[in-house]
Image (cartoon, grey):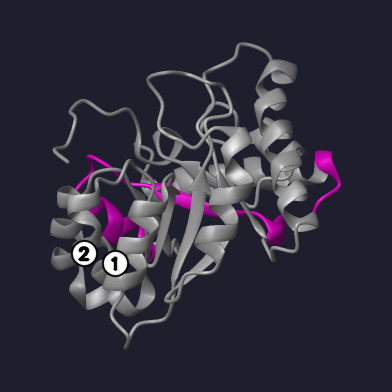
Amino acid sequence: MTGIADTLQDTHARIAAACAAAGRAEQDVTLLAVSKTFGPDAVREAHAAGQRAFGENYVQEALDKIAALADLRAGLQWHLIGPLQSNKTRVVAESFDWVHSVDRLKVAERLSAQRPPHLPPLQVCLQVNVSGEASKSGVAPQALPALAAQVAALPRLRLRGLMSIPEPAGTFDAQREPHRELFALLQALRRQGLQLDTLSMGMSADLEAAVAEGATIVRIGTAIFGGRTRRATA
């Protein structure tokens, strides 16, 4: 039976191959293990295999997991990658290291105000709706420059870059297109003077396309933990 240590090794091999194909250094791409709907034991097993960064979609599930794994807290990075409601910003500001899904100023302002002063600045990415899907969260590309400038000015936050969840595509070239667009948006913000270094894009099905277009964090769940049979509560 394949264990999490094996699937992590396989995923790192995919990242290494994708980086080689793109002419990039493997160390420039961070693997974020998406552990949503899998319990603390799965995270503990992944940690024992060397994984340190974990992504969660649902706030309450993540908080329960963070509490259950309090003995490992110093060695774990917790990333919120799912939608964030403004009424849950306080617990997120108090408990997470990264938030990838900021898409409006109100949420960023609340995270800034509620980040405890004894903690390092909360690392944040702005989620961009590159595919223009009505069902998807994310700021529209045309509204991104103004939002980025406002968020970058907030205390207790550090704006790191951009995140996207494009609609699935069937071919490698089609997968690359929205990732290429997100890279271009990041470059435009850099030309505005913003010091950004992060592109959170790419999942199990399109990891290679994302790396080819400059991903610095790839969010991999199924390829590591397997298929999901239940939906956690928010």
Q: Nearer the viewer, residue 134 or 82?
A: 134
Q: Which residue is mark 1?
A: 93
**How would you rate the neighbour count of disc 1 (Cα within 10 Å): few for under 14, some for 14-19, many for 20 or more?**
many
Residue 84 in the image: x percent, y percent?
29, 46
Q: Residue at x 82, y 39 (%)?
A: 21
Residue 25 can be seen in this image:
no
SS of the residue under disc 1: helix
Mark 2 residue element: helix
Task: Specify start and end residues of the magenta stretch as a single range.
Answer: 21-48
- The amino acid marked with disc number 1 is Ala
Residue 3 pos. (x, y %): 36, 44
Of the pair 79 and 69, the residue shown nearer to us: 79
Asked if the residue at tag 1 contacts the one at tag 2, i.e. Cβ–Cβ closer than 8 Å, the answer is yes
Q: CA distance from mark 2 to mark 1?
A: 5 Å
Residue ID at (41%, 81%): 120
Q: Residue at x 82, y 41 (%)?
A: 22
Residue 11 in percent (x, y) is at 55, 43
Residue 41 inside the magenta-drawn segment:
yes
